[in-house]
Image (cartoon, grey):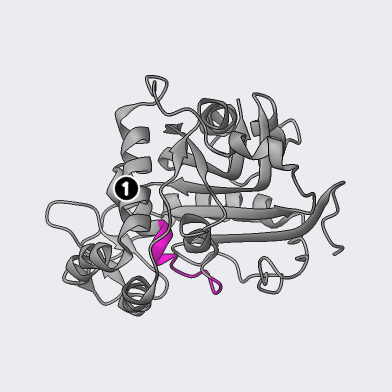
Amino acid sequence: MGKLRFRRIAKVALLASLSVRLLESNHAPCPMPHAPCPMPNPIYNNKLHQLVSELMGKLRFGRIAKIALLASLSVGLLESKTLPAERLPGRLAMQGNTSYLSALERGIITEMNRARRNPNAYSAKLVELKQHFDGKIIRRPGEVGIITQEGVSAVNEAIDFLRSASPVSELSPSRGMSLGARDHVNDQGPKGALGHTGSDGSQPWDRVSRYGEWQISVGENISYGPNTAERVVMQLIIDDAVPDRGHRTNIFQPDFAVTGVACGDHAKFRIMCAITYAGGYVE
C-alpha cells in the first residue's frame, strides 16, 4: 500500500469507521496533519459494503428486531501552497441566502457552530446521552436500539475533550461546497454505496472544485444513519471506533472557515449527510 499522492497536496489523512466495527483497520492511524497517511486496502470499501448488507439481513439481538448500523467516514487534506495576501478575503463564503439548504442541512451547520462556539456547554448533550446506554447499546424510548463499538467510554472521552477544548470560529455556509457534497449524495444514495470516492473516481476536493476554488485546506465528513442535526453532529464528535477521532478533528479544526452540507436518501442506511470543509472558498 503506497502513499496517496496528488499534485500540490502535501499532507493527507484518511480514516474510515463504522459504529459497529465490521472490519479491523488495515492501515495505521493517520497523524493528521503532520505526515502523509497510507491508503487503506483498495478492497476495504467493497468488503465493508458486503458485510453491511449481510449484517442488515442477519443480525438479531434480543428485543431489537432491527439494528441501526451507523456508518461514518472522514477525510482531511492539507495543501502546501501559500496564498497571496490579496486572495485572503475569499476565505469566507457569502452567508446571505441559504435557500439551497434544507432545514436538516442548515441545522447541521448550526449544530456544528454551536459546538465550535462553546464546546464546554455542548458537552451537556453528551452527558444526557449517557443515560440511554444499556451496555454498548443506545436504547432511546420507542426507538430501535443502536449498537456501538466502544459503548459509553467513547462518550466519556468526548465529554472530556469538549470540557477542555477552546472555542473556535464559526463556519460560514458555502453554496458551491454544498453542491459538491450534493453530487456525492446523489451518486451514493441510490446505490447504497459508502466512502469518499465517487463512482466517477472523484474525491472530495474534485467535487467542491466543480463549483469554485477551495483554499488552504479541505476536508469531508460523511454520516450514514442519523436523521437529525443533533444526532449527526454528536455521532461525529463521539467518533465511536475511530482511534484518532478524525471526524471530531474536522469539526473542531480551527483552519476550517467554510462548510457545505448535503443530505439525502440512502439505499442501505435510509439517510446520509456529506459535510465538506475548507479554509476558504471562492464561489
Q: Quadrant of the C terminus?
A: top right
Q: Where on the picture, by quarter, is residue 172?
A: top left
Question: Does the magenta run of residues contain 41?
Answer: no
Tell whether position 237 is magenta.
yes
Tell me where the magenta segment starts and ends, as one range. Answer: 236-244
Give whichever of 272, 87 is nearer the camera: 87
Q: Is residue 77 above or below residue 119?
A: above
> What residue occupies the far left of the structure in this picture?
141
Relative to 88, residue 80 above or below? below
Q: Residue shown at 85%/64% (left/top)?
A: 1
Identify residue for label 1. 111
Horizontal side of residue 90 vs 18, given as left or right: right
Residue 237 position in % (x across, y down): 40, 62
Q: Please, what is the dominant secondary structure of the magenta stretch?
A: loop
Dot 1 lies on which element? helix
x, y percent for residue 31: 67, 72
Q: Is residue 147 left or right of residue 21?
A: left
Residue 175 location, x and y as percent?
51, 26
- Residue at image position (26%, 62%) is 122
Question: In which quarter of the view is residue 146 placed?
Answer: bottom left
**Viewer-side residue, 49 vs 19:** 19
